[in-house]
Amino acid sequence: MNNNNDFSNNSSDVSKSGDATQSNDSTTDKRSLAEKPDKFNESIFPLNIGSLVISDEVLGYGSHGTVVYKGTFQGRKVAVKRLLIDFYDIATKEVQLLQESDDHSNVIRYFARETTDKFMYIAIELCIASLQDIIEKQNIGLYSNIRTQIKPENLLYQIISGIQHLHSLKIVHRDIKPQNILIAAPKKNQKHPRVLISDFGLCKKLEDNQSSFNNTIHMGAGTVGWRAPESLLLANSNEVYDTNSLNSNNSSNNSSSYFRISSDQISIDDHPEPIRITKAIDIFSAGCVFFYVLTNGQHPFGDNYYREANIINNKYNLNNDFDINIEAKDLIEHMIQSDYRKRPSAKAIMSHPYFWSSQQRLNFLQEASDRFEIEQRDPPSPLLQLLETNANLVVSNDWYKVIDKALLNNLGKYRKYNGGSVRDLLRALRNKKHHYQDLPDYVKDALGPIPDGFLHYFTSRFPLLLLHIYYVIINNKELRNDSIFSSYLNPNPEI
């Protein structure tokens, strides 16, 4: 008996180059499907359906009877997503959004679709693992190898790069979670595995003049534990919640972040009501995913049972047993802000100092010092006053008492410094970097090599310094628009 089923009379949508053709009118397709006899057994494998060959190897399962199989498309290995024809309209929308968005290295690639009486089959790029696999199964050889090939900051940058691409096309994903982030082998001339945003079943395309959805569009969309508070509040609108939590920082939060500053780069809506569903729901979910990656599977809002209640009540904890640096905590805390209007855009996230190299961070501090040196000191200019806001926290009251005696003695030979001034701390850093080769060996030994050791000397003693300068600059229009800072406030191509 030949088990190789050949489906020749199916509805087909094939992209030979990866850029798919536009789908046909859905009403016509559904009518023609209904008229076809049910004569094929789609439970016998392998299946030959148009351009696809589908094996019996199951890669995973989704909602509403969705199954993902391993298969081939024109000889290329692919994943084939099989959806019930009852969900034809949803599947067609998913295909259309895949067609619009797959021209990006961090979005899953679409190849083709085939339709039969019972199912729609969507062929997409075959990946080697999900983010959930490499975090929760990292003791297994394959997943362990992937983890060693990609740095956390590179992994997170690729995630937000994919989300930024979708948002630039006015597509909101609405189901960002570890299972929907896939890992693919690196392309030629690439060092790292590729990280891909996948599963577009819940995506929503905004119209050109839209920035949010109305409250009739799948308010409960998303996955339990990864949904933003505004989605939960609207999905459970018949229940009573304290909506003031959307505009407050709950006292139970155990976070070390010093920064509660709204940036001009962060879109703020002056009208608090009604709650709106915007691109910011993806940012919230991504913030939870960032924390999940950096803590090997933990969630900022706690265990599964209490997670959604904690999200609604803005109760999170970014302190844990893992060594997450202050820049990562700051970024995540901004991403999971309960007030959706205060979350940064994907583009702003891509330029956050967390993603900067040691050399970029050191150059930034040096150029910031150069910029503030031209400001009037007595009386201090408005920009200098802004720089010195909360100086006691940034310099630990008196930075003279924090640095090594060897460096202190070397500094005192040349000029006077004010130990309570952020500007003077920046100047000391700049001067020692500029004259590093002329320093005595014992001072070089204390400071460490440039850039890593030198930067660590200052940031380990003054952990708020980098972020303080960063927020001073991005929250001030004059400084933000200064050409010397433009390269730092755009997405980072070095990751």
Image (cartoon, rainbow, N blue to C red):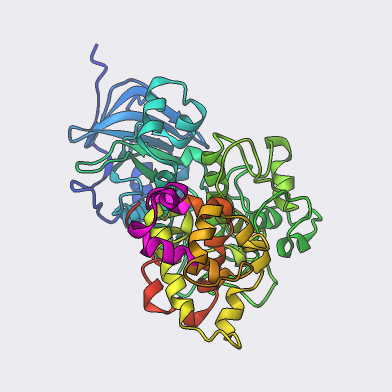
Residue at figure coordinates x 47%, y 75% from the top left: 209
Q: Is residue 235 left or right of residue 100?
A: right
Q: Magenta span: helix, strand or loop, mainly?
A: helix
Q: Position of residue 115 (x, y in %)?
A: 33, 40
**Residue range of the region highlighted in magenta in the rendering:** 428-455
Image mark count:
0
Q: Nearer the viewer, residue 206 or 310?
A: 310
Q: Is residue 461 left or right of residue 452?
A: right
The residue furthest top is 1
Q: Nearer the viewer, residue 110 or 154?
A: 154
Q: Position of residue 119 (x, y in %)?
A: 39, 36
Picture quadrant of residue 434? bottom left
Q: Is residue 398 left or right of residue 366?
A: right
Q: Position of residue 257 (x, y in %)?
A: 65, 56
70 falls in the magenta region:
no
Q: Nearer the viewer, residue 22 or 386?
A: 386
Picture quadrant of residue 343? bottom right
The residue furthest front is 413
264 lies above or below 244: below
Residue at figure coordinates x 56%, y 35% from the top left: 297
> In this orientation, does residue 91 appear?
no
Looking at the rendering, in which quadrant would you find the N terminus?
top left
442 lies above or below 398: above
Residue at figure coordinates x 58%, y 56% from the top left: 462
Q: Is residue 11 left or right of residue 398?
A: left
454 falls in the magenta region:
yes
> In this orientation, does residue 450 appear?
yes
Q: Nearer the viewer, residue 229 or 188?
A: 188
